[in-house]
Amino acid sequence: MNLNPPQGMRDFYPEDMLFRNYLFDKWREISRIYGFEEFDAPIVESADLFRRKSGEEIDEQIYVFKDKGGRELALRPELTPSLARLILSRIKELHFPLRWFGIVQCFRYERAQKGRKREHYQWNVDIIGEESPIAESEVIAAAVNVMTGLGMTSRDFKVRIGHRGILHDILKYHECEMKYFNQICLALDKRGKIADEAIKEMLKSDGLPESEIQKIFKIMEIRNIEEIESIIDNKSTSLNNLKELFNLLEIYNLKDFIEFDIGIIRGLAYYTGIVFEGFDVERKYRAIFGGGRYNNLLQNLGGKDLPAVGLGFGDVVIKELLEYKNMELKTNAKPDIAIAFLSDNERDFAIKIAELIRKKGISTDLFLKPEKPKKIFSLCNKMKKRFVILIGENEKETGSVTIKDMNSGIQEEVAINDIIKKIAP
Amino acid sequence: MNLNPPQGMRDFYPEDMLFRNYLFDKWREISRIYGFEEFDAPIVESADLFRRKSGEEIDEQIYVFKDKGGRELALRPELTPSLARLILSRIKELHFPLRWFGIVQCFRYERAQKGRKREHYQWNVDIIGEESPIAESEVIAAAVNVMTGLGMTSRDFKVRIGHRGILHDILKYHECEMKYFNQICLALDKRGKIADEAIKEMLKSDGLPESEIQKIFKIMEIRNIEEIESIIDNKSTSLNNLKELFNLLEIYNLKDFIEFDIGIIRGLAYYTGIVFEGFDVERKYRAIFGGGRYNNLLQNLGGKDLPAVGLGFGDVVIKELLEYKNMELKTNAKPDIAIAFLSDNERDFAIKIAELIRKKGISTDLFLKPEKPKKIFSLCNKMKKRFVILIGENEKETGSVTIKDMNSGIQEEVAINDIIKKIAP
């Protein structure tokens, strides 16, 4: 019997769940604060949903299988197509702009590599039905608030913001050959991840002439919006759009968290305007979160055109980063009680004490058989219990219990009525 | 484009998520109180894990598919085999008895029928490593506490408790032919669900002689433990085991919630002793939850023998029952604020007010463009907002806001510093 999980998939032992729940709670709390409502869709969808256009080949990284009725099903690689389906299906009843979020598991058949997983959990935040970049700013503000809620500051991470339209404008200004647009995007996307020389080689082998490559590297040097203003037409809607977003984010007090980055491209084909990604400042890790505007998705699925902005924030990179930063989990440590008894005669009394404490909502672990004090304390120590309640013959007779504070080591006899006062003052 | 979810799978719109989160929170709260730790395992496991013995055919209700490496994967139909795998994989580091719970989605390829779903969420609670029925009583107490936490009383539901070993003893006493054991179990399981006549027909067509059928119906008349005591040997370990559980549950103050039921069988082959199921008293619905002792599972997976007790509690039947009982969701209604502005000039001021309120942890929806008051109030009414904060030219000038209490309809001007006091006193 192979005891490992399937390749690329994770087991969650209780210590792993502590972090997962801590992160999910933070995602949920910030979503609620920012007025987003939670939704979910099947983890298994019709494979057709993930074919953007009919007849298109399905991405080979998607897990696809057939049910007994011959229907082709897929494990969702992302939530957004399901979001679009749910919206289209109730387009007349829903109120727009609509703010929805989801915390869902997504699957990708990645080639087996160190650190590459085939599933992850992802927080999705979307605003559907608003053209103005205030939609982007609400979504970015939510993501930043999650990060700061996890203890990260503007010295730890930045949101790098780009714009597809501006890239187009700049390429046009430099008279780049637009037939190379995809290769250019790929080059920009690789910047900082692989050496510049390797990018040059890549572009060369794609057939780009040296002159084009030089232009691209010049474009990659652009560091701020002012530089762009000096080269492209001030009437560019894309540029005004981006400038408005930066103004808005200043009103949200997020100036320290944001940077313009011409190299933010995002892999998915459906983004239509502003795109952004959150990175640690050292750039040790892949993007922590990312998103942008996708105004065509609902139309592609056969619905009417609705402007949309979305964000995806996974559970893997943030965990690596928090571990690297040695950030402690600020879990709500509730008093954690163990109740033990020394002989079978005290078992029923111990149950009654356990039930009494549980009625107060306090986490109470009950030993299920008598044990010696030494073993009880050693186990409770390993299991990080806060208090141990010990019940022997003596306690049962006097109607009291012995409580050991596992932090201080102090042990005292406490009357039944005073137990709660002692353990949860 | 088909806008429906795949057959038998559910979409969760925000109103559906309200119930799902309410139920999950209750499950999590009671698990914590009873000292259980949360775990999870991949929703996709190796198909082998669900073949109980090597070479066995896989249940045809399980979704199975191959990955590109040719490995056979399965969408989990239940969590327990994964639980066993995780335990076996760390058997030396874990402390027993171990209390774990999970809240997970499971899949079964049910034939399409009204109300039959192909996925559901399930709360799993397990105690591994304890022989005594105190393990059963802890698990049953947790399930009852979830039910009462949802507002159900002993007049609404009962936990029906049976015992596989006792059934064996009784059949032996009546000299039933044990070669019919499976058919007898099936008959007991069908009791109350289909007419007695239909059960008789079923047994007849299975080849049982009339005399055997009569015995079985006599056994089905047994209503309490005393009747069993009068017919089978008092030295029956199974009987003593069951009597001990009933004594224990009385100490937990659960006497009103439990009943002996010889007909509780549970479909799964792996139960070895006490089995139980929770039913609404009217028996309008299928079992709300169910579980029992399974002492052989870890051994079957190639590990050492460890006694175990488990419970599964799904999200579908309980929802139907609560709806039938007209039980309201007691969700923690937090103040829900909408902020709107009357012209573009007040947008930035509105953003600042929104961020101010959000910093206090209050759920705040921000209108993303100016609207007329009438439209604002009509939308906020539909979206069940508690307070609407309105910002016009006047408010911006005086540095105040207009707050409308959507319950009372009262509208008043409030200084910025007094907003929180007003909406979250």
Image: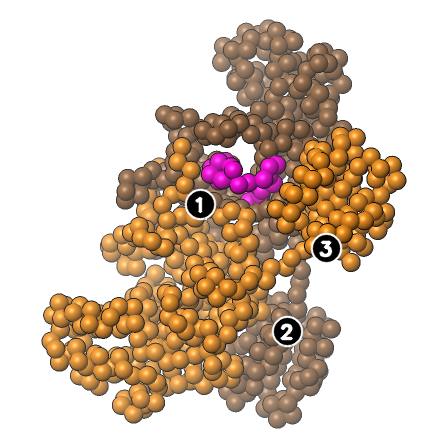
Chain colours: A orange, B brown
Q: Residue at x 71, y 14 (%)?
A: B235
Number of marks: 3
The kind of secondary structure element at disc 1 is: loop
Instruction: Using the image as rendered, state which of residue A362 and residue A156 is in the foreground.
Output: A156
Relative depth, front residue between A164 and A51: A164
Q: Secondary structure at mark 3?
A: loop
Relative to residue B299, is residue A251 depicted above or below? below
Tag 3, which chain? A
Residue sitting at x 67%, y 55%: A334
The x, y position of residue A113, in whole percent, is 31, 53
Residue B198: percent from left, percent from top:
56, 19
Residue B63 pos. (x, y %): 39, 38
Where is residue B229, by image quadrant? top right
In primary-sequence order, the first of circles 1 and 2 is 1
Label 2: few (<14), some (14–19) or many (≥20) C-alpha neighbours in 10 Å: few
**Residue at image mark 3:** A408
Is B83 magenta? The answer is: yes
